Image (spheres, rainbow, N blue to C red):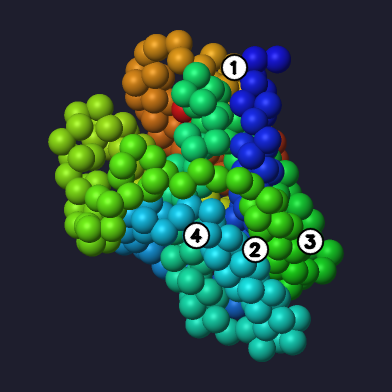
Amino acid sequence: MRTFDALAFRDFRLLWLGNAGTSAGQWMDQVTRGWLMYELTNSPLQLGLVSGTRAIPLILFSVLAGAVADRHGRKAQLVIAQVTNAILNFGLAALVLTHQVRPWHVYLTAVLAGIVMAFQQPARQAMISDLVDEAHIANAVGLNSMVFNASRSVAPALSGLLIAAVDTGGSYIVQGLIFAVSTIWTLQMNVPDPRKEGGRDRGQRSESIWSSSIEGARYIWSNHAIRSVIAIVLIPSLLAQPYTSLMPVFARDLLQVGAPGQGFLLTSVGIGALVGAFVIATLGNVGRQGLLMLVGAIVFGLTLVAFSLAAQPPPEAGPSPWFALCAVIMVISGLCNVT
């Protein structure tokens, strides 16, 4: 199938598998961290704050992380990030299982996980063009999105089941193991050094990391197409995507379906996103991508309005009768979001 053409490249296959593991760990962390904080504090405010704490490093360090990856090697940056993630997850698991965990532990590890993600994501994205030829880049990007959303379809439900069966500590142990396996796959990749291609090595060495970061920001701002794409992605990400951070409130207090229900709702988002990613990977460069992105952003916003209206508490004890409808709305939300 044309959908899987880019997997013919060995090193991209290894990157793709590593992406699957890392994505699964990140989605499990989102479910587990939110549930843990809500259990510790019963505060929707702190639930939102811990998610914001994790997101702030992504905003502050992403451009800098891209410059570091260009200068010092993307593979090394990726390995360090994955090892750090494994250590953070095993450490948080130990705190939970020994009943020593406190809200400040959740905040601290959220900041560190956000910093790791900020340095990990640019390296992963940039490596795609290092590992496949130009004709397969669009297909590889689609496959990368597909595995990200496949993980999104499975990992939240798995995390919810682990929380119900073993507590949040068991979920964090599994996450640490996933990051460890992903590191093994990453170490096996043969990644060309982009610094030595086209005579760029000398230019990179003579330019400071700060200058490289400023140059990247200027390029983004001066390029109308890239600036527009970033705006279309940034606005829904900033103003709409954080609804997933409040999912423990919807699952526990409104819909009354508990941690497994929270995982299933996020899994529903992943199923819709997986379908969208499969379509994009299959279509490749068909044109009108800008229109597709814009329509996806608009419909994504409308699905959140529908979800907020449907997520009503049940009239009596037990799960909400609107839970199935909420799950269907989340499928549509994921389908629109991935575009």
Circle 3 sits in a helix, a strand or a loop, which is it? helix
Q: Residues within 10 Å of mark 3 (few under 14, many from 20)?
A: many
Residue at the spot 64% in from the left edge and 73% down from the top edge: 87
Q: Earlier in the sequence, mark 2 or mark 1?
A: 2
Foreground tag (4 vs 2): 4
Q: Earlier in the sequence, mark 4 or mark 2?
A: 2
Foreground tag (3 vs 4): 4
Q: Earlier in the sequence, mark 4 or mark 1?
A: 4
Any part of residue 208 in sight? yes
Q: Which residue is mark 4?
A: 77
Spatial separation of the CA atoms under disc 4 and disc 2: 26 Å
Asked whether 296 or 6 is in front, the reply is 6
Q: In the rendered structure, find residue 32 and report the number of the disc placed on it.
A: 2
Q: Amino acid at mark 2?
A: Thr
Q: From the viewer's perspective, is residue 175 above or below residue 215? A: below
Residue at the spot 73% in from the left edge and 73% down from the top edge: 169
Q: Which residue is mark 3?
A: 162
Instruction: Tell me whether the residue at label 3 lies in contact with that at label 2, contact meaning CB atoms closer than 8 angstroms.
Output: yes
215 vs 332, left or right, is left
Spatial separation of the CA atoms under disc 4 and disc 1: 31 Å
Q: Amino acid at mark 4?
A: Gln
Circle 1 sits in a helix, a strand or a loop, which is it? helix
Spatial separation of the CA atoms under disc 3 and disc 4: 30 Å
Asked whether 333 or 196 is in front, the reply is 196
Q: Residues within 10 Å of mark 2 (few under 14, many from 20)?
A: many
Residue at the spot 52% in from the left edge and 50% down from the top edge: 244
Q: Amino acid at mark 1?
A: Thr
